[in-house]
């Protein structure tokens, strides 16, 4: 009986001292602002002959799945090849984040530094998504863009994946 009393006492003491959450972690509803994203906001353009790609980025503050609000960039793109419009999400530029009409979702929380964005972009023509990396050069007002396939298994997708929009290009801030 004495042994059981000791075990029950230890169990109750342990339960009283146990904490379900780390007290140093911010409570849900906390906002995580990211002022370094401001340098990317605006319209970026690339032209090569009669081919044009424009990307419009805007900063949003959204509620994530963990109950925190944080800043990110959403974007819209417009692509013309040989003067012919291939794809555009510019008609949705004034839509709210929650309407999910944007074709880019980006942030610089990947440990790459404040001048690098990573995220995803939609290929509207092929109805596919791909990974995108943007490196900004504030001195020259340019941004290098590299797109890659999203990691994972693909079914009925050509290998390598051919993107509709140009890759490995440098955009200039307008």
Image (cartoon, rainbow, N blue to C red):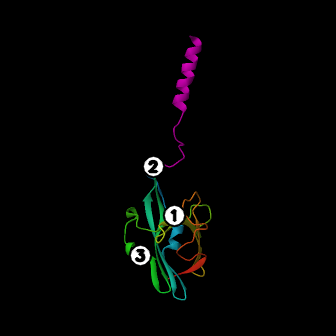
Choose the circle earlier in sequence order: 3 or 2: 2
Sort mark 1 into few (<14), some (14-19) or many (20+) by Cα contacts within 10 Å.
Answer: some
Q: Which residue position holds label 2? A: 28
Q: How many marks?
A: 3
Position of residue 68 measured from the top left corner of the image (x, y, whole percent): 46, 53
Q: In which quadrant will I find the N terminus?
A: top right
Horizontally, is 138 left or right of 65 in the view? right
Could you give the CA–CA distance between mark 3 and mark 2, rounded to whole angstroms? 34 Å
Name the residue furthest top: 1
Q: Magenta residues, as a range?
A: 1-28
Q: Residue at x 51, y 88 (%)?
A: 50
Determine whether, in the image, residue 69 is placed left or right of residue 149: left
Magenta run includes residue 92: no
**Residue at x 56% of width, y 77% of height:** 166
Residue 130, image x, y percentages: 54, 66
Direction bottom: furthest residue: 49
Q: Answer yes or no: do the residues labelled 3 and 2 have beta carbons within 8 Å?
A: no
* Residue 130 visible at all: yes
Q: How many residues crowd mark 3 within 10 Å: few (<14), some (14–19), many (20+)?
A: some
Residue in the picture at 43% in, 76% down: 88
State the SS at label 1: loop
């Amino acid at each position: 009986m004495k042994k059981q009393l000791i075990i029950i006492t230890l169990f109750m003491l342990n339960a009283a001292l146990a904490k379900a959450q780390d007290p140093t972690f911010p409570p849900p509803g906390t906002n995580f602002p990211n002022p370094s994203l401001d340098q990317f906001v605006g319209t970026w353009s690339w032209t090569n002959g009669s081919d044009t790609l424009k990307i419009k980025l805007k900063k949003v503050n959204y509620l994530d799945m963990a109950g925190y609000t944080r800043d990110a960039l959403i974007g819209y793109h417009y692509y013309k090849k040989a003067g012919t419009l291939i794809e555009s999400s510019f008609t949705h530029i004034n839509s709210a984040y929650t309407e999910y009409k944007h074709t880019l979702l980006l942030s610089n929380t990947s440990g790459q530094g404040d001048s690098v964005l990573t995220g995803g972009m939609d290929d509207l023509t092929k109805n596919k998504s791909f990974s995108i990396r943007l490196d900004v050069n504030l001195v020259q007002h340019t941004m290098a863009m590299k797109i890659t396939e999203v990691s994972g298994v693909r079914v009925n997708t050509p290998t390598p994946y051919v993107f509709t929009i140009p890759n490995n290009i440098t955009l200039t801030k307008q």
